[in-house]
Image (spheres, rainbow, N blue to C red):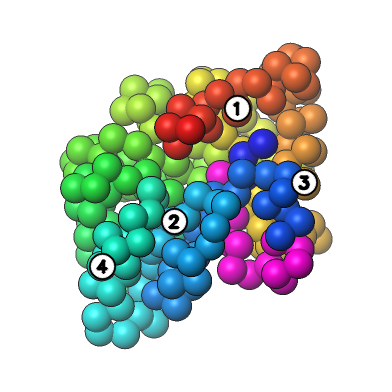
């Protein structure tokens, strides 16, 4: 199964190696240093980028260095990139500068964009649309329900996190979203309300989706895995 958004660089090596034997990991990066580490991974889908929480800490030249790294390493994805009005609104203008640079790169090289967007859901969708990006995943989507149709029509995807077992807004999203745009993620090893998120918890997500969709577990797995293969062209 796919874990479509996970911070591989934060896991101990042995733990990560255990996951790579059982999961297809889409490994996102936070900054230049972690992008370099991600680019060296084998057996995973590699995403390089600068997280919105890190743009104010970026050194001059870091953005250009990550862009060059994406080109040199021939990665299929930029991420974790995006906009954040909830946690770091004070850097929004700089976030947008960085995000647009990554969108230009994604358009030029036909890369997937792995997107972070708390309270900037409509902003990121509009930026993706304006940049004419073909493939994007908006991770841990808890945005407006009425934006889901636009996301679908643009050919983009959202990912559902193990937090869905307790996060009511995430449950609402999972229930009403077009099933053809739903992917699964862990966002590990992030800590959320006492849960240490990691790939195995995705099994709990599947169980919750089976409940919300009133579908057999195997059918849920078949749907989300087909969606993932379509996004990643695998």
Residue density around tag 1, few if under 14, some if 14–19, many if 20 or more, within 10 Å? many
Spatial separation of the CA atoms under disc 2 and disc 1:
20 Å
Tell me which numbered mark, 4 or 1, is placed earlier along the sequence. 4
Q: Secondary structure at mark 1?
A: helix
Residue tagged by mark 1? 224
Tell me which numbered mark, 2 or 3, is placed earlier along the sequence. 2
Where is residue 177? Give x, y as percent: 53, 24
> Seen from this angle, which residue lies furthest bottom?
59
Where is residue 71? Give x, y as percent: 27, 60
Q: Are marks 4 and 1 in contact (CB under 8 Å)?
A: no
Spatial separation of the CA atoms under disc 2 and disc 4:
13 Å
Residue density around tag 3, few if under 14, some if 14–19, many if 20 or more, within 10 Å? some
Residue for point 73% across, 44% down: 22
Where is residue 111? Give x, y as percent: 32, 45
Q: Quadrant of residue 208?
A: top right
Q: Is residue 63 left or right of residue 231?
A: left
User: Magenta span has 153?
Assistant: no
Which region of the structure is painted magenta? Answer: 4-16
Residue density around tag 2, few if under 14, some if 14–19, many if 20 or more, within 10 Å? many
Any mark on residue 47, and which?
A: 2
Task: Give 114 or 55, whichever is nearer the viewer.
Answer: 114
Q: Is residue 38 visible?
A: yes
Residue tagged by mark 4? 68
Q: Is residue 107 left or right of residue 54?
A: left
Residue tagged by mark 3? 201
Q: Is residue 81 left or right of residue 195?
A: left
The quadrant of the picture occupied by the N terminus is top right
Q: Are marks 2 and 3 in contact (CB under 8 Å)?
A: no
């Amino acid at each position: 199964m796919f874990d479509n958004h996970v911070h591989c660089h934060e896991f101990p090596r042995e733990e990560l190696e255990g996951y790579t034997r059982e999961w297809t990991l889409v490994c996102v990066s936070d900054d230049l240093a972690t992008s370099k580490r991600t680019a060296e991974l084998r057996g995973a889908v590699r995403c390089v980028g600068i997280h919105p929480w890190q743009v104010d800490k970026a050194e001059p030249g870091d953005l250009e260095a990550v862009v060059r790294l994406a080109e040199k390493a021939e990665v299929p994805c930029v991420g974790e990139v995006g906009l954040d009005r909830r946690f770091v609104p004070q850097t929004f203008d700089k976030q947008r500068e960085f995000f647009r640079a990554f969108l230009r790169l994604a358009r030029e090289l036909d890369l997937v964009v792995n997107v972070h967007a708390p309270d900037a859901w409509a902003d990121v969708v509009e930026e993706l649309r304006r940049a004419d990006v073909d493939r994007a995943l908006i991770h841990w989507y808890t945005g407006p329900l009425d934006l889901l149709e636009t996301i679908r029509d643009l050919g983009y995807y959202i990912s559902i996190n193990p937090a869905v077992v307790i996060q009511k807004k995430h449950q609402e999203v999972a229930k009403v979203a077009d099933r053809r745009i739903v992917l699964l993620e862990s966002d590990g090893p992030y800590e959320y309300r006492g849960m240490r998120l990691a790939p195995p918890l995705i099994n709990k997500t599947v169980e919750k989706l089976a409940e919300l969709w009133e579908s057999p577990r195997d059918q849920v797995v078949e749907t989300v895995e087909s969606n993932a293969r379509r996004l990643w062209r695998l």
